[in-house]
Amino acid sequence: GVDAEAAESLVKDLETVDIRKGDVLFNEGEPGDSLYIILSGKIKLGRRAADGRQNLVAVLGQSDMVGELSLFDPGPRTATATAVTDVRLARLRKQALRPWLTNRPEISEQLLRVLARRLRRTNDQLADLIFTDVPGRVAKNLLQMAGKFGTRDGGVLRVTHDLTQEELAQLVGASRETVNKALADFASRGWLRLDGKSVIILDPERLARRARV
């Protein structure tokens, strides 16, 4: 990892940015010159298809990086980043990071690991769309969000995702009706309970078996 001295010096170059729920941090197609670290709140990444349809790519939370691709690729932003909740971020501009990438190879290694995880996630999503049915993808996405946003609530796991039904369907890569049918089936089996923009997971083991993870 990065040693304490390097981390402390890097923090000096960070700017705090606050955005409100619904605000756009950056748009797909815009030039990018900064990465952001989420300090609190949730950000959704979306892409627009040629016919105008929106597709939700990921939901990111505390400690996740956003926009790091712009540090290595001079091309435009590949997705639109929108605040799902009120969000506080730390911003690091490309020109501030460049000396660190040159003089501190361990920082470059950490950023490359982040990019590798994103690539692996994309590959997993493509494989799921081909090989996993919709209920399996719903279960897998719920468990992934539980790992990021889950909190213990009276002995059960509450996952506050803050997404609409349509956004949840986009994340899964299926129609809203099909995703709702899968959620209703899981609820009828006693695996989970729906509570607004939260899911209360009652039987994570059964969900994991359904997701084949």
Image: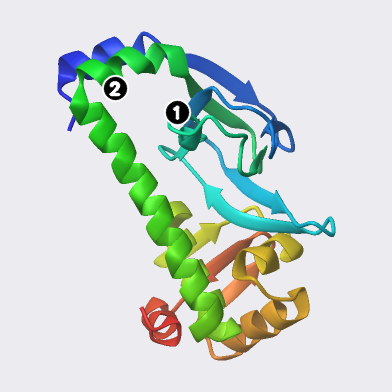
Is residue 107 toward the left or the right of residue 58 in the image? left
* Residue at the spot of label 1: 71
Q: CA distance from mark 1 to mark 2?
A: 10 Å
Q: Local crowd at mark 1 within 10 Å, few (<14), some, or many (≥20)?
A: many
Left or right: 113 as drawn, with respect to 86: left
Q: Quadrant of residue 80?
A: top right
| Residue 84 at x, y percent in the picture | 66, 43
- Give the structural element (helix, strand or loop) at label 1: helix
* Above or below for 187 versus 172: below
**Which quadrant holds the C terminus?**
bottom left
Relative depth, front residue between 113 and 200? 113
Identified at 17% across, 13% down, the residue is 5
Residue ID at (54%, 91%)? 189
Give whichever of discs 1 and 2 has the lower sequence position: 1
Residue 175's tag is none
Looking at the image, the residue that sits furthest to the right is: 51
Q: Label 2 neighbourhood size at 10 Å, few (<14), some (14-19), many (20+)?
A: some
Callout 2 amino acid = Leu
Q: Is residue 99 left or right of residue 158?
A: left
Quadrant containing the N terminus is top left
- Amino acid of disc 1: Leu
Q: Are marks 1 and 2 in contact (CB under 8 Å)?
A: yes
Q: How many marks?
A: 2
- Left or right of 20: which side holds 118? left
Look at the picture and state if 14 lies above or below 72. Answer: above
Q: Nearer the viewer, residue 195 or 83?
A: 83
Residue at 51% over, 46% down: 60
Residue that label 2 marks = 101
Residue at the spot 61% in from the left edge and 47% down from the top edge: 45
Against 12, residue 203 (above or below) is: below
